[in-house]
Image (cartoon, rainbow, N blue to C red):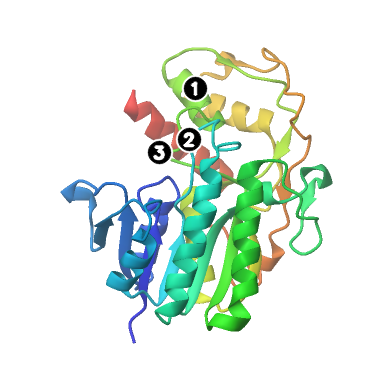
């Protein structure tokens, strides 16, 4: 029996890479977005245009596609606004509607794109089942509620479910206002990149490896939360300096030119052993990923 996968948020930063990885893994992919892609980007995928926040649309879509697998990547992602947007609550409702329709149609595997914002960030290293789930934003609270709802459903409805908690994904097409695009665009224009101290420790993973992690989760039957990250903590200053080197403009990096944010925790990294136990490992080194990402942004200028 073929595996028919419905991917929501399929034109987003992570969603589009999941579509590509799932096609390569042999899934019959049905992709959903608020608009269809250009014909030359459609690929071997069935595209559906839908507003998943519209009443009845999740059920209609599931009844049309009849997926065996569902990967839910659609959510409120407007830069800066998504942390507190009331639309997070609407997306929680949409997730519930998708899950109910999926269960009613006999679906087998539901994967949610989650977030490190579901955790208590004061803990430093995030470990599934050990670090408290204590979100400090509406975004994190709604993502956590969606995860908990799915886990509570699984014993009753016949599908298995997992949440991939993404930490810091990067790569081509990331929102231009985020850190790595900002530095890359500044350097490619020979502008100065004005940064904070860079002492903060994070974990960055190329979006292609993020997508492959979600395919591993799709192929598994394991329930629960799985951290998605490189597993290699790095200071933000090292990210900036690496981009300075690959651009040939290390002198354009200005660490300490801006104050550190008062709400920025010093360490926020994942323990990735649970994901690795399923056979996943990152294939793109941080250095290679940064070089390729810088080249992509430079080509956009």
Q: Which residue is mark 2?
A: 78
Spatial separation of the CA atoms under disc 1 and disc 3: 22 Å
Q: Earlier in the sequence, mark 3 or mark 2?
A: 2
Q: Under tag 2, what secondary structure? A: loop
Where does residue 255 sit, x and y in percent of width and height?
Answer: 67, 18
**Dot 1: few (<14), some (14–19), or many (≥20) neighbours within 10 Å?**
few
Do the CB atoms of the residues marked 2 and 1 lie less than 8 Å apart? Answer: no
Do the CB atoms of the residues marked 3 and 2 lie less than 8 Å apart? Answer: no
Q: In percent of the image, x 63 and y 71: which residue is there? A: 151
Q: Please name whichever residue, 33 or 123, is drawn nearer the observer in this view of the structure.
A: 33
Spatial separation of the CA atoms under disc 2 and disc 1: 32 Å
Q: Under tag 1, what secondary structure? A: loop
* Marker disc for residue 248: 1
- 146 left or right of 75 in image: right
Where does residue 95 sit, x and y in percent of width and height?
Answer: 50, 60
- 276 left or right of 7 in image: right
Where does residue 52 sit, x and y in percent of width and height?
Answer: 38, 54
Q: In terms of image quadrants, where is residue 251?
A: top right
Position of residue 226 relative to residue 142, above or below, is below
Residue 191 visible somewhere in the drawing: yes
Q: Earlier in the sequence, mark 2 or mark 1?
A: 2
Q: Under tag 3, what secondary structure? A: loop
Q: Please name whichever residue, 41 or 239, is drawn nearer the observer in this view of the structure.
A: 41
Q: Which residue is mark 3?
A: 173
Q: In percent of the image, x 78 and y 50: which residue is there? A: 125
Of badges 1 and 3, nearer the viewer stands 3
């Amino acid at each position: 029996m073929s595996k028919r996968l419905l991917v929501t948020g399929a034109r987003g930063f992570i969603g589009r890479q999941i579509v590509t990885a799932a096609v390569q893994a042999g899934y019959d992919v049905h992709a959903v977005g608020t608009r269809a892609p250009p014909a030359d980007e459609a690929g071997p995928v069935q595209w559906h245009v839908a507003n998943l926040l519209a009443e009845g649309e999740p059920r209609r879509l599931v009844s049309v596609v009849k997926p065996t697998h569902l990967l839910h990547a659609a959510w409120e992602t407007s830069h800066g606004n998504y942390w507190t947007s009331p639309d997070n609550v609407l997306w929680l409702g949409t997730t519930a509607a998708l899950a109910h329709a999926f269960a009613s149609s006999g679906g087998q595997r539901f994967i949610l794109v989650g977030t490190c914002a579901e955790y208590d960030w004061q803990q430093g290293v995030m470990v599934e089942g050990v670090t408290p789930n204590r979100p400090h934003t509406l975004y994190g609270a709604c993502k956590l509620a969606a995860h908990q709802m799915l886990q509570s459903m699984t014993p009753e409805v016949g599908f298995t479910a997992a949440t991939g908690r993404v930490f810091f994904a990067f790569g081509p097409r990331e929102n231009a206002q985020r850190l790595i695009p900002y530095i890359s665009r500044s350097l490619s224009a020979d502008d100065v990149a004005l940064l904070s101290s860079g002492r903060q420790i994070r974990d960055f993973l190329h979006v292609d490896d993020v997508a492959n992690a979600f395919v591993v989760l799709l192929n598994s039957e394991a329930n629960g939360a799985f951290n998605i990250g490189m597993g290699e903590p790095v200071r933000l200053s090292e990210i900036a300096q690496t981009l300075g080197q690959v651009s040939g403009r290390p002198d354009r990096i200005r660490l300490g030119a801006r104050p550190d944010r008062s709400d920025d925790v010093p360490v926020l990294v994942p323990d990735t052993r649970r994901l690795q136990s399923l056979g996943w490992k990152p294939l793109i080194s941080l250095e290679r990923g940064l070089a390729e990402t810088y080249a992509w942004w430079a080509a956009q200028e």
